[in-house]
Image (tube, rainbow, N blue to C red):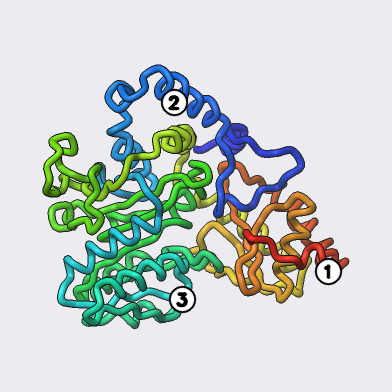
Amino acid sequence: MTDFAQTRTMFHLPDGMIYLDGNSLGPLPKAAVDRVARTVKDEWGDMLITGWNRAGWMDKPMSVGNRIARLVGAEPGSIAMGDTLSIKVYQALASALEMNAPRKVILSDSGNFPSDLYMAQGLCRTLGNGYSLKIVTPEEVLDAIDDTVAVTMLTEVDYRTGRKHDMAAITKRAHDHGALTIWDLAHSAGAFPVELAKAGADFACGCTYKYLNSGPGGPAFIYVAPRHHDRARPALSGWQGHDAPFAFDLDYRPAGGAERMRVGTPPILQLAALEASLDIWDTVDMAALRARSLALTDQFIAGVEAACPTLTLATPRDHAMRGSQVSFRHPEGYAIMQALIARGVIGDFRAPDIIRFGFTPLYTTTDDVAKAVAILSEIIAKSLWDTPEFKTRKKVT
């Protein structure tokens, strides 16, 4: 059984702060400070370019990917690290469309993160020739999958509401109709057990700076099901994804497996920070994490609904449909969140009216939840949000 009181001690959490925004940026693992410092001083500093061999830098994208594989139910050798989530979405989408020609319809939903939709729109413009993106509501996805769809591209957990798709059911229906699937795990990896292999997913992507705590700008990952390793051709045919980078061939030849999805030079310093976080994750039982997450979110929902009747729950009550966040709606949501932040409760706001709170059992406690409910209740009851200061929009919400 995971000792969550112990894992909490492994993070730097500022005094007086209740941090409920790990679904946007995870806190600093204390060990990351020394891990990155050693990488800078002992590897970059003393080894310089020999670090690619002596410190194993060149192998990091796959070795770290294998550590993430356990958290998302993926097979060994099926996950490669590097680049950004948008790039990995683009890669997966381009490969899936090529594999499933002549179909040309990408199916997504209105709860998908906008940047995923932007990637799809841009790729459709580049390809031309009838390629299109079809967007339906999250509730309509299953019925919208038909024999015209080439690929479904969905974020498993809606970034605004926390609504969780049924990955297994959607993947099965897609396959029954000859479509491939891409899953964005930005709000799934580290939030609850994910079962990519068991569900039969074709591709998946995710970031590591949220629940996996790699730090701002941390590297993304891409999953390619082993059955597709020889068929998925990378649209971004980068040097790092070549079968023999140091042969310096003038023509591209993809590496085997998911490694062909590597593009640019791996971000060694941020991978070091991620490794420090994964040392903590290696001690975590994912079933225990899920049980704790649901208990914390249940506690928060019950407390807020009892104390703040003017807030409307946007997150599903059904455990099977809930990620590890809770969102409420209010017309003055932005100002309410700014008032909370001023009182030391850190969540965030998502347009047009959602205040959003992430719950990470590795460091979130029942006492944190109770205090956050009490502070939110006072802010609502006394209209403490109703000031020009809290209504002035900042660049990042």
Residue 163: percent from left, percent from top: 50, 68
Residue at 34% over, 56% down: 88
Q: Residues within 10 Å of mark 2 (few under 14, many from 20)?
A: many
| Residue in view at x 44 percent, y 65 percent | 115
Q: Position of residue 50 (x, y in %)?
A: 30, 22
Question: CA–CA distance between discs 3 and 1?
Answer: 31 Å
Q: Residue at x 62, y 74 (%)?
A: 352
The amino acid pointed to by label 1 is Asp
Element assignment for label 1: loop
* Spot occupied by residue 156 in the image (x, y as percentages of width and height): 42, 63
Three-letter code for the amino acid on which mark 3 is drawn: Ser
Q: What residue does disc 2 label?
A: 39
Residue beneath the point at 61% across and 71% down: 351
Q: CA distance from mark 3 to mark 2?
A: 42 Å
Task: Give 48 or 154, whichever is nearer the viewer.
Answer: 48
- Looking at the image, is mark 3 or mark 2 nearer the viewer? 2
Determine whether, in the image, residue 166 is placed left or right of residue 316.
left
Horizontal placement of 312 versus 33: left or right? right
Query: Which residue is disc 3 drawn over?
Result: 110
Write down the residue under mark 1. Answer: 386
In the rendered structure, are the residues bearing label 3 and label 1 in contact, judged by CB atoms less than 8 Å apart?
no
Mark 2 touches mark 1? (CB < 8 Å) = no
